[in-house]
Image (spheres, helix red, strand yellow):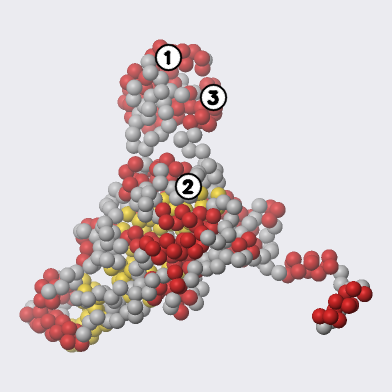
């Protein structure tokens, strides 16, 4: 005690009365909230200096140009006996919106049909007529500016609107026609479908989404599952594997490029979803936000399996390629996740450059209320993605339409260059991370042939097993449809037979749309195998 008193005098401290340490620790444990960020307490968020500054944006439309365009619009409409009560202009980064109020008795459909004539009189590309503008008693004519303004990602992220945003997963897309920063919450969408022809800004759009989330969320609060069939689009994010990425336990690389692994990962996410729903059910919570709040307030017991659950964002860069190689195998888990995963914090961002009906199927489309379309080549593609025309009349280079419900908003997507993304990933990757990426539940797919073979039980095999094996080996073609035709079976029973033949080692694993490989070369080898099974 004398030493303590002496040190206290030296440091000019007041020595308090002795306290019961056990009591205070217990009280502290119950009163202090749990902080999930403590595992990486020294983590620093990326800084604005990592991004390029492209100078202060200046509106590139002169007053003379505005007046000339107004006069031309009025003149063109007057040629068709359409008179206008008033016209006003709003200048945006790439497009100027002219709002007109027609005189009483003028049919709106008449103005809508003059799209091409107005474009001709203004010598402009991509005129778009909004008749009427929702919530206003006006008709809008969008005319592209001759000199476009670049919307830098830095200028969007540095705004107070983004910095002070209290959204769960805020995404700063860019600027609207009114020159306002456009921010949307992925957690509220809750899934996003993106489409656009090659070179119209889709990959930059994905980078903008990922960058926005990296600037606002701690690694303990958010994980990405990145699916990149092109192999090069999302490879930059490899560096943040131990901070922000999630993967399968047996997978070497966190960014998934192989179709088989994509199927396994999607099914693994479905398992994660089911496990999370079980936790929410036990906790008596309706969504992830409520559950995490309860856990942070220490009202859930970790010994019963409860833990802090991060948001998981699944990003698929090219859906068309996956649908071509795996079809239903990919569509079913995507549809399941889209239907059910919103409440437990798993959100999907799916991009494709081919928005045709066989890629964006009805099931997928129905579960993606939020959609983004960059410029597409035809009206049909625009209707497939947005359920209405307009995306075919965009001017490219990040010009996009954002649709949620019945609202359609035209936005100039922000621009973030590859070196900028590289610097951000380096900045995060150089910091201390977790021991590994966030591990998803283990899923043994069709490629785990050995595991399937062990589970094969000769007692449970179909009565037509031997006959089916002989047909497959004779024709050297491992297809379900062959068994359906030859044995006059339904699809389900033929499918079960193929599974049993795989388990017995007669045919190889599932390979997308291709027929399975036949592993038995001739009938003599097959008879030996059948005898050994019996």
- Count residues near mark 3 (Cα–Cα under 10 Å), then give few for <14, some for 14-19, many for 20+: few
Q: Which residue is mark 2?
A: 253
Residue 278 is situated, as x and y percent measured from the top left of the image, at: 59, 52
> In the picture shown, does residue 226 fall above or below 519?
below
**Secondary structure of the residue carrying numbered label 3:** loop
> In the picture shown, does residue 315 fall above or below 414?
above
Residue 429 is situated, as x and y percent measured from the top left of the image, at: 51, 59
Q: Which residue is mark 1?
A: 525
Q: What residue is rendered at 51% in x and 14% in y?
A: 532
User: Based on the displayed image, in which of its 4 quarters is residue 137 positioned?
Assistant: bottom left
Counting residues from the start of the chain, the first of labels 2 and 1 encountered is 2
2 or 3: mark nearer the eye: 2
User: Based on the displayed image, in which of its 4 quarters is residue 27 positioned?
Assistant: bottom right
Extreme residue toward the right, this view: 2
Residue 276 is situated, as x and y percent measured from the top left of the image, at: 57, 53
**Secondary structure of the residue carrying numbered label 1:** helix
Q: What residue is rendered at 70% in x and 57% in y?
A: 301
* Foreground of the two, 276 or 107: 276
Q: What residue is rendered at 54% in x and 45% in y?
A: 249
> In the picture shown, does residue 9 fall above or below 530?
below
Q: Measure the alpha-carbon separation of dots 1 and 3.
A: 20 Å
Q: Which residue is mark 3?
A: 457
């Amino acid at each position: 005690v004398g030493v303590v008193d002496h040190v206290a005098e030296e440091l000019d401290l007041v020595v308090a009365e002795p306290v019961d340490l056990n009591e205070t620790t217990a009280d502290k444990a119950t009163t202090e909230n749990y902080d999930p960020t403590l595992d990486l307490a020294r983590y620093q968020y990326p800084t604005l200096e990592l991004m390029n500054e492209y100078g202060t944006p200046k509106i590139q439309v002169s007053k003379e140009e505005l007046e000339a365009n107004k006069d031309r619009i009025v003149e063109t409409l007057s040629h068709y006996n359409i008179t206008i009560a008033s016209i006003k202009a709003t200048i945006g980064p790439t497009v100027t919106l002219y709002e007109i109020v027609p005189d009483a008795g003028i049919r709106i459909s008449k103005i809508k049909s003059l799209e091409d004539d107005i474009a001709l009189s203004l010598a402009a590309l991509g005129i778009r007529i909004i008749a009427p503008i929702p919530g206003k008693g006006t008709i809008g004519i969008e005319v592209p500016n001759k000199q476009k303004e670049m919307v830098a990602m830095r200028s969007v992220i540095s705004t107070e609107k983004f910095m002070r945003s209290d959204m769960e997963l805020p995404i700063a897309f860019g600027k609207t026609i009114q020159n306002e920063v456009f921010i949307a919450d992925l957690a509220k969408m809750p899934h996003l479908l993106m489409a656009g022809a090659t070179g119209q800004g889709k990959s930059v759009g994905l980078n903008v989404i990922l960058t926005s989330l990296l600037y606002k969320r701690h690694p303990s609060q958010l994980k990405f599952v990145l699916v990149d069939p092109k192999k090069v689009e999302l490879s930059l994010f490899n560096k943040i594997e131990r901070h922000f990425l999630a993967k399968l336990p047996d997978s070497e690389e966190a960014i998934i490029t192989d179709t088989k692994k994509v199927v396994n990962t999607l099914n693994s996410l479905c398992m994660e979803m089911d496990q999370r729903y079980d936790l929410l059910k036990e906790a008596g919570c309706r969504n992830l936000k409520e559950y995490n709040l309860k856990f942070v307030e220490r009202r859930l017991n970790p010994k019963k399996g409860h833990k802090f659950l991060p948001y998981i964002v699944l990003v698929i860069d090219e859906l068309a390629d996956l649908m071509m190689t795996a079809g239903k195998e990919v569509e079913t888990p995507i549809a399941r996740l889209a239907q059910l995963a919103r409440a437990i914090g798993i959100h999907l961002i799916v991009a494709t450059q081919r928005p045709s009906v066989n890629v964006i199927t009805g099931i997928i489309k129905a579960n993606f209320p939020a959609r983004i379309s960059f410029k597409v080549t035809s009206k049909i593609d625009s209707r497939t993605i947005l359920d209405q025309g307009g995306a075919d009349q965009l001017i490219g280079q990040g010009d996009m339409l954002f649709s949620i419900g019945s609202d359609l908003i035209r936005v100039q997507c922000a621009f973030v260059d590859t070196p900028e993304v590289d610097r951000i990933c380096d900045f995060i990757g150089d910091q201390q991370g977790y021991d590994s990426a966030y591990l998803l539940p283990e899923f043994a797919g069709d490629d785990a042939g050995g595991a399937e073979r062990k589970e094969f039980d000769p007692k449970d095999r179909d009565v037509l097993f031997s006959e089916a094996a002989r047909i497959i080996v004779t024709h050297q073609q491992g297809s379900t449809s062959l068994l359906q035709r030859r044995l006059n079976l339904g699809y389900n029973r033929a499918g079960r037979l193929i599974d049993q033949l795989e388990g017995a080692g007669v045919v190889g694993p599932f390979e997308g749309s291709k027929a399975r490989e036949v592993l038995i070369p001739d009938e003599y080898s097959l008879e030996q195998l059948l005898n050994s099974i019996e």
